[in-house]
Amino acid sequence: MRIALGSDHGGFLLKEEIKKYLEKKGIEYKDFGTNSTDSCDYPDIALPAAQAVASGQFDRGILICGTGIGIGIAANKVPGIRAALCHDTFSARASREHNNANILTMGERVIGRGLALDIVDVWLNTEFAGGRHQRRVEKIHQIENK
Ligand code: RB5
C-alpha cells in the first residue's frame, strides 16, 4: 500500500510521528509536506496529496492539520476523494467499512500521539464492506457530476 502523507504547520509534528509509524511497519509513503512548523496554508498541501490519491498514484492518504477539519474540507473538493475526519477508532473503522474513505484526516491539536497512531492502524487495516455501502458511495460520486 502506498500512502500520500501531508500536513500544514498545525499538524507537522503528528505527521512526523506517523512517518515513523509507517517506516516501522514497512509501509511506503510520500511526504507532501509541510517541512516545518512555519505557518503555511493547508489547501496547498491538501490539493496535490488528494490529487495523487484520486489519480491512483497512491492507494490512500493521511492528512493532518490543527483540527483535521480544514485539510479535510480541501481534500474533499477533489473528485474521487472521500476524506474522513476521525478522532476515535470506531469512526476510523466505519469510515473504511461503510464509506470506503480514501483519506484519513486528524487534528494534532485535538488528540494525542498514542490515539492517533491507533487510529492510523485501524484505518489502514480495515477493508471496505461493499454491498449496500457501495451503492451509497456511488451516489456520493453522482453528486460530483451534477
Ligand atoms: C492553523 O492555525 C489551523 O487553522 C489549521 O491547522 C487547521 O486546524 C484548519 O482547519
Image (tube, rainbow, N blue to C red):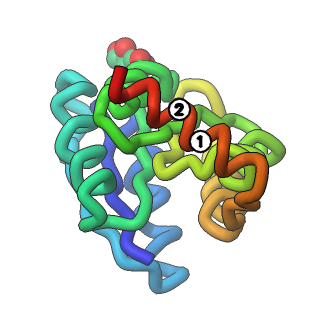
Residue type highlighted by circle 1: Val
Position of 11 with respect to 120 (left or right) is: left
Q: Position of residue 54 (x, y in %)?
A: 31, 51
Can see residue 68? yes
Residue at 27% of width from left, 36% of height from top?
A: 46
Quick one: SS at disc 1? helix
Disc 2/disc 1 C-alpha distance (Å): 5 Å
Q: Position of residue 141 (x, y in %)?
A: 46, 36
Q: Which mark is residue 140?
A: 2
Q: Which mark is residue 21?
A: none
**Dot 2 beta carbon under 8 Å from ligand 1:** no
Residue nearest the viewer, comparing 74 with 40: 74
Can see residue 115? no
Image-quarter location of ligand 1: top left
Residue at 43% of width from left, 59% of height from top?
A: 60
Quadrant of the rendered image containing residue 39: top left
Relative to 30, say whether 8 is above or below: above
**Dot 1 beta carbon under 8 Å from ligand 1:** no
Quadrant of the rendered image containing residue 9: top left
Residue nearest the viewer, comparing 92 with 32: 92
Q: Which mark is residue 137?
A: 1
Counting every numbered tag in the picture gives 2
